[in-house]
Image: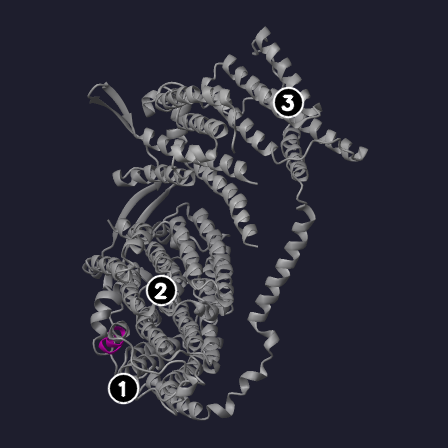
Amino acid sequence: MINLMILLPFFFAVLIPFLHRFFNNKLHIGWLVLFLPAMIFTFLLQYIPITQAGDTWTSEMKWLPSFGLNFTAYVDGLSLLFSLLITGVGALVILYSVFYMSRQREALHNFYVYLMLFMGAMLGVVFSDNVIVLYVFWELTSISSFLLIAYWYHRRKSRDGAQKSMLITIFGGLSMLAGLLLLSIITDTYSIREMISQADSLQEHILFLPAMILILLGAFTKSAQFPFSLWLPDAMEAPTPISAYLHSATMVKAGIYLVARLTPVFGGDAVWFWTVSLVGITTLLYGSWNAVRQKDLKALLAYSTISQLGLIMSLLGLGSAAVYFGYGDESKVYAIAIMAAVFHLVNHSTFKGSLFMMVGIIDHETGTRNLQRLGGLMSLMPISFTITMIGSFSMAGLPPFNGFLSKEMFFTGVVNASAMDIFGMETLGMIFPVVAWAASVLTFVYCMILVFQTFTGAHKPDLLLKAAHEPPIGMLIPPALLAIFVVVIFFFPNVLAKYILDPAFIAILPDYAAQGGLGKEISAWHGFNTELLMTIGVVLFGLILYKLLPKWIKVFSWYPQSLTFNNLYNGALQLMESVSDTITKKYMTGYTRDYLIYIFVFFIFIVGGSLWLFNGFAFDMSNDSPVSIYEAVMVIGMVVAATIALCSQHRLTSIIAVGALGYLVSILFVIFQAPDLALTQLVVETVTVALFLLCFYHLPELRKEISKVRFKFTNMLISAGVGLTVTILALSANGTRLFETISGYFEDSYALAGAKNIVNATLVDFRGLDTMVEVTVLCIAGLAVFTLIKVNVAGRDKK
Amino acid sequence: MKPNDILLAAVTKVAVLIILTFSIDLFFSGHHNPGGGFIGGLAIASALVLMYLTLGTEIVNKLVPVDFKTVAAIGVLIAVLTGAGSFLFDVPFLSQTYGYFELPILGKTELATALIFDTGVALAVIGSAVTIILSISEDR
């Protein structure tokens, strides 16, 4: 059932274009699409009691059982938490998009098809237990994200941003695939659960470290961790509902999901601990540092997302030390970091989602997102101001908002970690609290910029494209709902913890399963401890820095533009393009005969070479039947036809000769009692000759080739080589038996497939997948021919 | 294409009928005798090509008012959906089955899901082959 829920968005995506055609004149199809995530969300709610009781739920759908590949959906606290976020935020985003995306001007069907693809893929990622299935869905999220970023594809920036995100995340995805394959080689299974059950015996394996690094590359690229974070700011070219959904609440958390999911496998290892927490904390600082200088509200939020993702990542890294200690009082001290990560994940989705929507509203209602033009909107958009303030203050870590709670837990996590005495933390542990604190100050600063530079100060109506006013009520509902969550979670954190967070926590740290969670109440007040003092310090320093912002903002211009990662990326891209262009131009001459030469030479070397290397020459004629007179006549006829085709002065003669050759071959098949083959060959020949005759119309008269002797000699050498290789191959194949014959299996076709025709049973049943793919290739080839000829003609006519 | 060969046209009218009948027989007999979706589809395609060659594009387009690109796409869709249909019965992708049924007129007949799959193959082959040939022939 749960598998169907994952596939449902895909099926629905197929329907959307039809719905769009029928309903677009009457209503916004977002209303129809909204129904789906809402339904899946409601459906998923029923699993809460299951995971809350510490149970899990699996349901398996066979995909390719012969390869051990099954579509296994695994519901536990972690996957449930993510899926609720995906569908919950998804529903709100779609509701928001109904008002944001114009029905008349936008290609809505594309938008919602991509969105549904993404939703299905993302659900697939979090529910898959099979690593290969997980990878497939993972790449699908990258692709749908690419499509959504390039949604306004006529803008150059959109296309560039889409390409950047695609290149970076697919690079990570591929290395993740390699890592997952290594992991499955170590554990001899594709199932994540079985990998986890073998976790204790893995660390000695030689492939353990490479697998870990490769998988982390995947997670870091997806979750925009430093230095791969450069794609996220450019992804902001996507429509704002998409930025709110993919690039802050869900897709960028896929990397975090992966790290959390594999913590039981890799956690407790020093390399994992250091890589994840250092990359995370670096990203946290990098993101918040860069967010402060942004002038575009969406760019500011993009960097802030990077920084918050880094925060969660570093918490997961620090908390992985708990795996090292197993279960106990000492482990509990570090496990709080994991709890903080899960908690902050939820909180970030609520406040960042609402903030993105608010920025979208500001953009929508004023026509700009530029901080230098905005200001003084408080009196014009009071509701928007309130919601933005709630979101920002929560992000800054102020009470009474949920961000305060998780920020305090984050401080607890880093302070506890600094006291750790393993993995060399005795000496280096202090960097974590210091960096965390500094980054939090910067976070506070950009949160203040976000609220006060937009809503207070002087209103500059002449700089705005539209007269600022409150958006329609429907547009305010989704962010307002999220803002309500922000406040409610602050007052009742333990309800959330009991039903959602603890089960997710157990999924990351299975050692705590018996106890049902961390067993620690989340509370807003725990006396004047280090964490509270850190928060007070953050607020004080943050306020000072914010007030003095105009004085020190120049710092950012000190760093040379040429040394940024963006510049590096662009340079590398250009270099790659020019190098591959040069190489391609060298061998892509545009002549078919050159390409044929490559193919044939390659063929001779590979086939002939392997025959020679493996000593495959074995001529055994003893079992051959005697050559009958018919066969001899056929072969002579074929030789004659081939010679005519070569030597003829007219194309038409050549074409007919080639046709004759083909028909003779098919008669040969008849003699050897292969009616299916003969029939196919006959029809194929007929169609080919017809095609040839059609092409013939366009070809110039055949003229005497005047070419160099060397050129002719090379051609002759190659053709002789091919002929020789094929002949030797055919003769040797008869004399060699490397494997037991498999034809016995196919002879049972009537018992197995109810078909007396072996050939057909093979085509449609035994090797049905091959046929399906072949048919698809054929169809694509047909469409390609059509496009090449017709579309080009249309273009020519226009000019 | 605007051919003007009366003899060829006269022969074609009869020949196409025979070829089409034969192709349909090829298609259905594929389960137990030589034939099947691929051959059947190609044979139908060749009949269509013959018609295009003798009668000309305009007349045939009137007689057979279908877009062969769509035919190809529908064929692939049928093939993929038969494969995906296996999931509804909780069996691996592309599992085929068959059974014997008492049908009116035909009597005891074997019906196989493979036939649906084969229909997809045949449609895809017809669609692609005719699309390719038509595109090339119409290129000026």
In the rendered structure, which amino acid carries the disc numbered 2? Thr
Q: Which quarter of the picture shows residue A106?
A: bottom left
Sooner in the amino-acid sequence: mark 1 or mark 2: 2
Residue A723 % position (x, y)? 66, 25
Q: In this orientation, which residue lies closer to the viewer: A333 or A378?
A: A378
Query: Is there any visible trace of residue A66 in the rendered image?
Result: no
Which residue occupies 24% across, 75% down?
A473
- Vertical order, A12 against B7 (above or below): below
| Residue A488 highlighted magenta (yes or no) | yes
Query: Is there any visible trace of residue A729 in the rendered image?
Result: yes
Q: How far, Cα to Cα, is label 1 from label 3?
A: 89 Å
Circle nearer the viewer, 1 or 3: 3
User: In the image, which disc is placed on residue A250?
Assistant: 2
| Residue A552 highlighted magenta (yes or no) | no
Q: Which residue is mark 3?
A: A727
Circle nearer the viewer, 1 or 2: 2
In the rendered structure, which amino acid carries the disc numbered 3? Thr
Q: Which residue is mark 1?
A: A527
Label 2: how many residues lie within 10 Å, few (<14), some (14-19) or many (20+)? many
What span is colored magenta in the figure? A481-489
In the rendered structure, which amino acid carries the disc numbered 1? Gly
Please report, as a chain letter, where disc 2 is located.
Answer: A
- Vertical order, A25 against A642 (above or below): below
